[in-house]
């Protein structure tokens, strides 16, 4: 975790969790309208291949030479379409409906967070007299950290609070319903401060699992 906190990022405008939830709800409504999906989990392979390119979000498999130590990267350059690069194995895993595709789906949702929340800001800053500077994540409050914002967006997009509040199932069942990993689901419940699952699941143990999950959830470095 200390290595992740030492990662340098561009400080972005502050966003509250509530504001991120509202933006994610808008985007999810658009994605549901595009796909006509009726279930809880969004069809990410269909979205990436067919629907998102139509609204200017283009996903490509990319080599390690292009991505370095990152699993995916959102390119803020350009004026219109936004290009998002992913490691080939993650790109291909979007077609896997079970646990094999969990990380791929979370990664796509995370990068959409960067595209929606941060690319407009970064594009507006181009050419201004004061250049953008990078700072250690440890120096930023979470609400100004682009990585925290993007992960919060991903959770809200994949697992909306309005739906979770009505579900009374253990975390492993909830994770399966939404096509995410158990650590991702529990971490999102903890972020929203919602009790997790059925009667056999205590909030205390869920918070411990959420803390343990953070390095795995945030391991991939992203382009800011």
Image: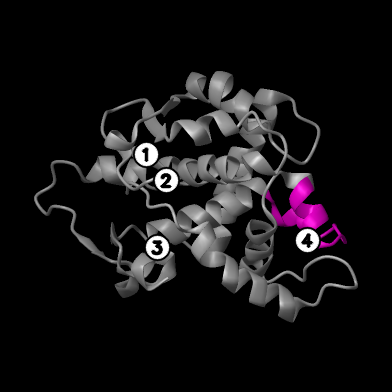
The dot on residue 114 is 2
- Say which element carries label 3: loop
Mark 2 and mark 4: Cα distance apart in space? 27 Å
Mark 3 and mark 4: Cα distance apart in space? 30 Å
Determine if the magenta segment contains residue 173: yes
From the top left corner, tell me how far across and down residue 145 is, in percent: 38, 62
Q: In this rendering, is residue 46 above or below 77? A: above
From the top left corner, tell me how far across and down residue 93 is, in percent: 59, 33
Instruction: Answer with mark 3 or mark 4, whichever residue precedes in sequence.
Output: 3
Q: Residue at x 79, y 54 (%)?
A: 174
Mark 3 vs mark 2: give the one in front.
2
Q: Is residue 173 left or right of residue 218?
A: right
Q: In this rendering, is residue 2 above or below 27? A: below
Mark 1 and mark 2: Cα distance apart in space? 7 Å
Instruction: Answer with mark 3 or mark 2, whichever residue precedes in sequence.
Output: 3
Please give the residue where the numbered disc 3 appears in the rendered image.
14
Q: Are marks 1 and 2 in contact (CB under 8 Å)?
A: yes
Q: Residue at x 11, y 54 (%)?
A: 130
Q: Residues within 10 Å of mark 1 (few under 14, many from 20)?
A: many
Please give the residue where the numbered disc 1 appears in the rendered image.
74
Mark 1 and mark 4: Cα distance apart in space? 30 Å
The dot on residue 171 is 4
Q: Are marks 3 and 2 in contact (CB under 8 Å)?
A: no
What stretch of residues is rendered in magenta?
Answer: 159-176
Mark 1 vs mark 4: give the one in front.
4
From the top left corner, tell me how far across and down residue 58 is, in percent: 43, 25
């Amino acid at each position: 975790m200390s290595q992740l906190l030492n990662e340098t990022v561009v400080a972005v405008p502050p966003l509250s969790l509530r504001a991120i939830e509202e933006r994610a709800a808008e985007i999810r409504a658009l994605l549901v309208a595009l796909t006509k999906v009726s279930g809880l989990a969004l069809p990410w392979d269909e979205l990436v291949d067919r629907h998102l390119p139509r609204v200017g979000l283009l996903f490509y498999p990319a080599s390690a030479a292009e991505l370095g130590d990152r699993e995916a990267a959102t390119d803020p350059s350009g004026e219109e379409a936004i290009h998002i690069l992913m490691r080939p194995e993650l790109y291909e895993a979007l077609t896997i409906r079970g646990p094999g595709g969990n990380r791929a789906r979370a990664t796509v949702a995370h990068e959409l967070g960067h595209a929606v929340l941060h690319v407009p800001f970064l594009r507006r800053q181009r050419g201004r007299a004061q250049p953008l500077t990078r700072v250690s994540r440890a120096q930023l409050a979470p609400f100004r950290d682009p990585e925290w914002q993007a992960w919060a967006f991903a959770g809200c997009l994949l697992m909306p609070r309005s739906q979770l509040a009505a579900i009374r199932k253990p975390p492993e069942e909830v994770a399966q319903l939404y096509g995410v990993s158990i650590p991702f689901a529990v971490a999102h419940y903890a972020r929203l401060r919602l009790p997790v699952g059925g009667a056999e699941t205590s909030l205390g143990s869920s918070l411990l699992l959420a803390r343990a999950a953070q390095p795995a959830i945030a391991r991939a470095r992203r382009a800011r």
